[in-house]
Image: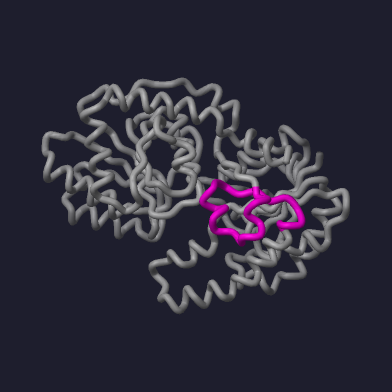
Amino acid sequence: MRIGLYCNWGIVHHNGTFYAPVVHKSYLDVISEKNGTVYLMCSVKECIPHISYANIDERKVNIITLPSFQSYIGSTPHFFSIVKGFNLLINKCDFIYIRTPEPFSWIASLLKNKTVTLNYHYSSNPIEVILNDDKKPYFIKLLKVLMFFPEFYLISFAAYFNNASANGPSVIQNIPFFIRNKTRVLYESTIPSLTLLKKKHRSILKDKKIKFLSVGRLQNGKGLHIMLDVFSLIKDKHPSVEFELTIIGSGPLSDVLSDYANSLELLDKVTFKGEIANGDELNSFYASHDVFILPSLSETGPRVLIEALSESNLCIASNVGYVSALLGERAGLIVDPGCVDDLSKSILWVYENRKQAQKMALSGFTVSKEYSIDNFFHQLFRG
């Protein structure tokens, strides 16, 4: 089966070579290994690749290049380039995975022939993302929603007459009503199945001091200020509790969060490591910590939770995205988003119930084996 993808994954081109973020490079490697040549249609930027990027093997992945754009509005001048790209993709492929909502992806449904299967995969809650942008005034957010709404419904009508899937149950709740019942829930992962099989369970919480880890983009909606408030509270009210907190990631709040941690007198216990690429280096951080914290106020996935579970971390996560589906009642601790009291109680529970916490981490490790890139695409293609 010849596989095509329409995914604007931040692909860059430099000195005759294409580069992709490591996570998306893993997707391409798994698909090409299982199915042969892959065709990727995407916006491409000419620049030096970031350290978190890896080169794409063009013997296995053919890039259908679109001009560089960063937003829906930015894609508008390139409408005909996208039409031309879809014509190429449809003529080359049997199955096309369309990461939704990519700009003008409804066009594929108009151009396709009877031999091509289209799958529109809702990867995020775009309306929610717009409305949760704390930096924008409400009327600006409302205007953006109104501008995006017709496009979103055109894509959803296209999905209705083809195949549709969504990255977790929370996404289902935010797509148009007429497409919900025919949309399959699938769970994206960042980890190939062979890598998951090689991972061995490790013992955690062996020392008096507990090492906590948080990984993600440092931006609004991630609940990071709340997490720092919780650790400040624990430091003040429970001085005998020994902890270290490592925060990995970059983003617009990098300096703001560091300054905030300093104002809370936490810099002796909190370390900001910046961005670290997926792979061995990031995995070594998971493997050297005991507890992973996801304090987000809103998420689609998150895929980092699967990474943490696979490295035997006990996970404490806000009830967002597909967290409850992954952790259930036995594989981790679930807290209300934005609730300082909930998060502090869960952290203190770990100190007082280490054996139960270790068993919970083992359950989480076992659960993670079910969630691989291979399994995600196997279910997608089988549908």
Quadrant of the rendered structure where residue 271 is? top left
Indicate whether residue 261 is drawn in magenta: no
The image shows a total of numbered marks equal to: 0
Front one among 68 and 352? 352
Q: Residue at (28%, 44%) from the top-left corner?
A: 343
Render colour scheme:
one colour
Quadrant of the rendered structure where residue 90 is? bottom right
User: Where's the N terminus, which quadrant?
Assistant: top right
> Is residue 283 something that shows in the picture?
yes
Q: Residue at (83%, 61%) from the top-left corner?
A: 111
> Is residue 12 something that shows in the picture?
no
Q: Residue at (49%, 62%) from the top-left corner?
A: 128
Compared across the picture, whether 281 is left or right of 32 comes to: left
Residue 194 screen position, x and y as percent: 60, 26
Q: Residue furthest right?
A: 114
Residue 19 screen position, x and y as percent: 62, 48
Compared across the picture, whether 41 is left or right of 280 comes to: right
Compared across the picture, whether 139 is left or right of 370 comes to: left
Residue 375 screen position, x and y as percent: 63, 34
User: Where's the C terminus, which quadrant?
Assistant: top right
Front one among 257 and 113? 113
Front one among 115 and 208? 115
Q: Residue at (25%, 27%) from the top-left corner?
A: 353
Question: Does residue 144 sit above or below 363 in this rendering?
Answer: below
Residue 220 screen position, x and y as percent: 38, 60
Compared across the picture, whether 95 is left or right of 17 comes to: right
Residue range in magenta is: 159-183
Question: Does residue 311 sit above or below 379 in this rendering?
Answer: above
Indicate whether residue 163 is drawn in magenta: yes
